Amino acid sequence: MSDCSLIVAMTKERLIGRANDLPWHWPEDLKHFKASTRGGTVVMGRKSYDSLGGKPLPKRVNLVVSRSRGADAGPGGREEDGVRVFGSLTDACAWVGRERPGDTDHCWILGGSSLFRESLAPLDDGVAAFAQLGLPVPRTLVVTWVPSVPVEEGDILFPFDEAWIERHYDAAERRRGETGELEFVTYVLKDGAGA
């Protein structure tokens, strides 16, 4: 079984996406994202992958979960255009645990919303629920808090709840022309959460 962290940028309203894209562009967020995930294994849904231009992120092992494209891929996934495609998050996480790309069984879950929901849903039922579903317990959540953006109908929100406690905080420098400060916060599961 692999170990995983979730990484996401969101507003205080928990907004993470609009029309398969980010409703903001913050160079500091992209720099933080690259520094956090470079050299690692990243897992993303098909829509997230498509929003990146349908190209793998450089200097990372890229896994894409797609129920349609990966339906016949099997538990080992299938190599396709520089990424490994899986039919389920469970298969992707199991592959990372078995293959240990880059000599680690850790992976970063990048989203989209359905992968976030799937990877967090078992928290309500405890660690046994993760094992039953073949999913790793997400022990770390790395958030870039960005300035508020008005939420519109159809926007995608992150399922953030009280299971997390702040472990590390850092604020980005303000840059000319920007309207607010970015906060980089690493959370860990509270004692007893997911137990």
Image (cartoon, rainbow, N blue to C red):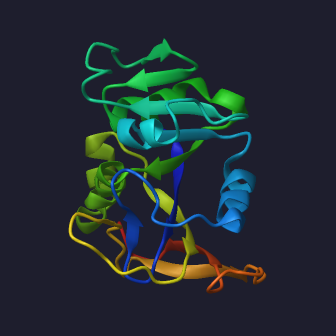
Q: Is residue 173 in view from this perspective?
A: yes
Image coordinates of residue 150 in percent, x first then y, are 36, 81
- Above or below residue 135? Residue 160 is below
Whether residue 142 sits left or right of residue 111 in the image: it is right
Image coordinates of residue 95 in percent, x first then y, are 48, 27
Whether residue 114 sits left or right of residue 76 in the image: it is left
Residue at 22% over, 63% down: 154
Image coordinates of residue 68 in percent, x first then y, are 25, 24
- Front residue of 102/8: it is 8
Residue at 65% over, 65% down: 29
The image shows a total of numbered marks equal to: 0
Instruction: Give the quadrant of the C terminus.
Output: bottom left
- Above or below residue 174? Residue 156 is above
Whether residue 119 sits left or right of residue 83 in the image: it is left
Image coordinates of residue 104 in percent, x first then y, are 67, 37
- Front residue of 168/13: it is 13
Q: Is residue 195 in view from this perspective?
A: no
- Front residue of 178/121: it is 178
- Above or below residue 123? Residue 137 is above
Residue ranking furthest to the front: 177
